[in-house]
Image (cartoon, grey):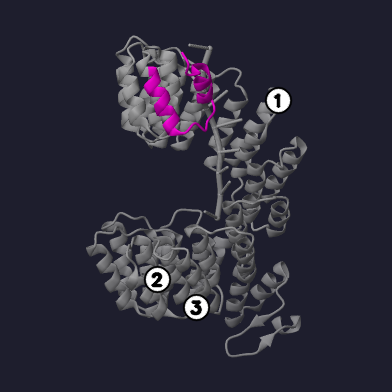
Amino acid sequence: MFIPFNSLVAQLSKLKLPISRTKELHAFIIKTHLSQDPFYATRIIRFYALNNDIISAHNLFDKTPHRSIYLWNSLIRAYARAHKFRNAFSLFNDMLHSEVMPDNFTYACLVKASSENFDLHSLRVLHGGVVLSGLRLDFICSSQLVSAYSRLGCITDASKVFSGIAEPDLVLWNSMLSGYGGLGELEKGIKLFSKMQIMGVRPDEYSMVGLIMTIDDSSVLKTGEAIHGFCLKLGVESNDHVTSLLVSMYSRCKCIDSAFSVFGSLVEPDLVTWSALISGISLCGDSVKALDFFREMNMKGGKADASLIATVLTACSQLANVQPGIEIHGYAFRHGYHSEVMVSSALLDMYSKCGFLEFGYQVYETMVFKNIVSYNSIISSLGLHGLASHAFQIFEKALEEGHKPDEATFSALLCACCHAGLVNDGREYFRKMKDHFGILANTEHYIYMVKLLGMEGQLREVYELVQSLQEPIDSGIWGALLSCCDAHQNYELADIVACRLFGNKLENSSYRIMLSNMYASDGRWDLVNKLRVDSGITKLKLPGKSWITSKKTFL
DNA sequence: ATAGGGTTAG
């Protein structure tokens, strides 16, 4: 044999074998009947799979009479990785009828595939198979089951599998932790984290990633900082995943200084980290700075994607000046992103918020693909500019084209009604939303309804609407209700609302200011004074009168 | 002799 066969096979174990080489080797192996040997066939199959040539891999599989577990698993895995789930599962069925039985790796691979395919049914069937084949306690199977159930939102099933394992290994702990992380289960995550340490398992960077994900807003910033401290203690804070996630954690919490300082430790931040930082800055209201960082990213050779462009456009829409928005429009155009739905919706939103509804409308008209998000943008733009009937027309058009309206669609419609003072249309949309489209009203919808009904002075109807809501009632709704009372000088209703608020300890400074203004208008200085003392209000504005600031005047 | 289980963000 003058072909250095061993060296060819050895090359197979290096990942970068060109496909032509693999074919050559395949031909050789067929010629020498080595494909009969499951060992060599498996190697070739794996390398076809690496080169995205599953057809050849499957051909070879068909020609290999003696099929080892390695051979089956390699091909199943190749299909699963290529997201050809039907092929993977049909092979699995063939396997069940063959002389080789699936092992823990077969199940692990298919369990993962079923979660990637959002196929809870198959996942449950496979789980059954795992239990039946006695692999229930296998770490590899069960860690995949835990991850798969969590990914599909079935956290109870995930934790059942997890708690069935007496002494989980690090990967299992981490699977469970990221399961909690993905669903924002902070308390459970923290509890598990301390439990694993009590059991003597040292957390690693994966554990920290799972925990960091649970920190989703500024109310839990303290915990987030403690987790950050723990990363330092473990020495995993310089892991890129960890650093990047810390940046987005601090951005979500609007704790932009910390986001900066963590970001600064990255040598080469990737696109998503830049995006997290930029959207954090924009979330904090500093659009100018957000744009500066976007420019800096570009200067450093970073290239934005559709999602970042949409984020930056949202920042532009908060500016009083349309110029930067136009620049980003140009950028989107040059990079070929202007016709992506996400970008064009953001563009139309930006133009209309910057006061150039016509430009926004042009973007809308030239959009090739429209989805419900784009329709929502144009409906809300028209509504904000007082063009309610045009907004209604577009809504009908979206329906005719078969788009399914969502919560945001009705927010936009109700907003349009508010701006145009169309109380009856608002009532009608509010009714249709539930009866026709089965969409439950959210806080925003109720706020619009309160404003709308309040406009007409239907205070009784407004109050009944709010009464019908389940506790806890959002503060925005109370605020809208109080404004109605104020506008119509209905102090009686304001009293009822105030009782509800104070009785439930829901009062905050903006309610207090609103209430004390109302009480002052009503001449109830005792109450004004009480509120003032409680909350340090020093100014009052009476309708038609000047500011009253001294304590004496109150009395 | 073969491989094969857990991250990620806007």
Disc 3: host chain: A
Q: Is residue A83 above or below residue A378?
A: above
Q: Earlier in the sequence, mark 3 or mark 2?
A: 3
Residue A173 quadrant:
top right
Q: Amino acid at mark 2?
A: Ser
**Image height of A401 relative to A208, above or below:** below
3D distance between C-alphas at marks 1 and 2: 53 Å
The mark that comes first in sequence, 1 or 2, is: 1
**Which label sits in the foreground, 1 or 3?**
3
Which residue is denoted by mark 2 in the rendering?
A380
- Please state which amino acid type lies under the numbered disc 1: Ile
Q: Which residue is mark 1?
A: A198
- Badge 2 marks a residue whose secondary structure is helix
Would you identify the image quadrant in which residue A287 lies?
bottom right
Residue located 62% across and 61% down the image: A297
Farthest right residue in view: A233
Image mark 2: chain: A
Position in image of residue A430 (x %, y %): 33, 64
Prevailing SS of the magenta stretch = helix
Let me know if marks 1 and 2 both belong to one chain.
yes
Q: Secondary structure at mark 3?
A: loop
Residue A34 covered by magenta stretch? no
| Residue A494 place in picture, x, y as percent | 52, 71
Work out whether mark 1 precedes mark 3 in sequence or the reverse, and give the earlier one.
1
